[in-house]
Image (cartoon, rainbow, N blue to C red):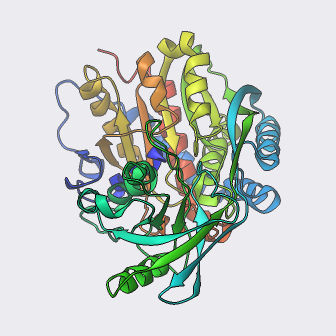
Amino acid sequence: MKRALVIAILASCVPPQRGGGPVAEWIGDTSSFGPAPAARPPGIADGYRAVAAKIIVAAREDRGAYTKLSHLTDRIGNRLAGSPALDLAIAWAAQAMKDDGLEVRTEKVMVPHWVRGTESAALITPIARPLHIIGLGGSVSTPKGGITAPVVVIKDFAELEGKAAALKGAIVLYDVAMPAYSETTGPGYGQVVPYRSRGASRAAKYGAIGMLVRSVTAHSLSTLHTGAMQYDPEQPKIPSGAVTVEDAMLISRLAAQGPVSVRMQLESQLLPDAPSANVIGELKGSEKPDEIVVIGGHIDSWDVGQGAHDDGAGCVMMMQAVALLKRLGLTPKRTIRVVLFTNEENGVRGGNAYAKDHAAELGRTVFALEADSGGFAPRGISIKTKPEVQPRTVVRVTEIMSLLAPLNATRVMTAFSGTDVEPMLVGGVPTAALFTDTRTYFDIHHTEADTLDKVDPAELSQAVAAAAIIAYVIADLPGRVDDP
């Protein structure tokens, strides 16, 4: 499951409610920041208001991130792990950061190499009609010629258990609607994605021979949404794909009237692991260069669309944040390290490799910030740390976030941080995710529609400003944000 995207739930204006997604703790909106708690060092934000204002003005006038994203999306395109396009993207990103004056290197990572093949599906009975289908990442192929089987429609896992006797030799369709975005609960992604990620093995346990899932989106124009799925090693591996919202609803209506059968054919294959790399660019600190603030996104994407919001935008906003600081002559005390992680989408090999390869310096890594919720306007930050340091870290970060009031990006949550930075928690690194206004994100997430035209250059520039301010201030503070 693409866990980083769950943080999008945190982008709502009030705390998320219990019931399917992760539970977050609302810390506050620092645009109305109250009297200073006794534990808060006084004046953290006061010393940086002028520089924050300078960064915001410069970022709003800058379109460097959008220019970078234009090249990444239009010239290179989607970038699944193991693909030649990902290799091109890694080489391009390394050169782009060198051109911006950073110290750059790549670090080898071996990644899974799953390849999509020919895909087709059709209703066979009670009517003959083609269906839209897209294989889920990691799915095995069907036998040659595909499979044709009766369909059992499932609305939730409880119903799956109740219909266990009917599943042998069947194709299971999880027709589970994703709730629409609301100002109370945010997007409903976290509530439905388990059917995509775990549904195949749960169905295979009862003898199902194939799995279809309703595309994980609340709004559809016959749009197919792919994404990672995972097999339970204790169960048979069955071919798995997503159908459009419209096709899932059609099958459900027909199944309510009588038997339905479907033919599906997937020709995907898993090849041997392929070489890839994390890309690292650094702005060396002026006084404590061995202490590090990591900021980053993931350079890979799914093999559909252009990977513009997911996560080309996250990569370029972090690249441009440091480029902007360098252009403004703002060198903090500590080093700011941009890390573009490989293979977030279907393996997290890049994030895990970074934490392992840099284990010796995690004690000197004072903060890690990830961007993986699209190139929309920033709304705040979600923090995850060791429990014993979280209260003081949150207090300090909350005051720092008050500097983002002109961007309406002052919200602070404590919950999930991000797929690629979370492995650093084992070394005691405070981790965080920059989250954005995700009201329309899941309309295009993991689809052919994730293209450059969906990105607003002005909103992307605001996200650059937010990332630059957070990174600069935390890297420049006299002490760490989690110091006693």
Task: Say whether residue 353 is left or right of residue 76.
Answer: left
Quadrant housing residue 396: top left
Task: Say whether residue 31 is left or right of residue 307.
Answer: left
Number of numbered discs on residues: 0
State the residue lying farthest toward the top.
Answer: 360
Determine whether 260 is above or below 276 in the image: below
* Residue 186: percent from left, percent from top: 32, 62
Determine whether 148 is above or below 399 in the image: below
Q: Nearer the viewer, residue 343 or 49?
A: 343
Q: Nearer the viewer, residue 365 or 138?
A: 138
Q: Nearer the viewer, residue 391 or 5?
A: 5
| Residue drawn where x is 26% and y is 45% of the image | 24
Determine whether 265 is above or below 387 in the image: below
**Screen quadrant of the C terminus:** top left
* Residue 447: percent from left, percent from top: 59, 66
* Residue 64: percent from left, percent from top: 71, 53
Residue 479 visible in image: no
Quadrant housing residue 481: top left
| Residue drawn where x is 52% and y is 48% of the image | 372
Residue 468 visible in image: yes
Task: Say whether residue 99 is left or right of residue 320.
Answer: right
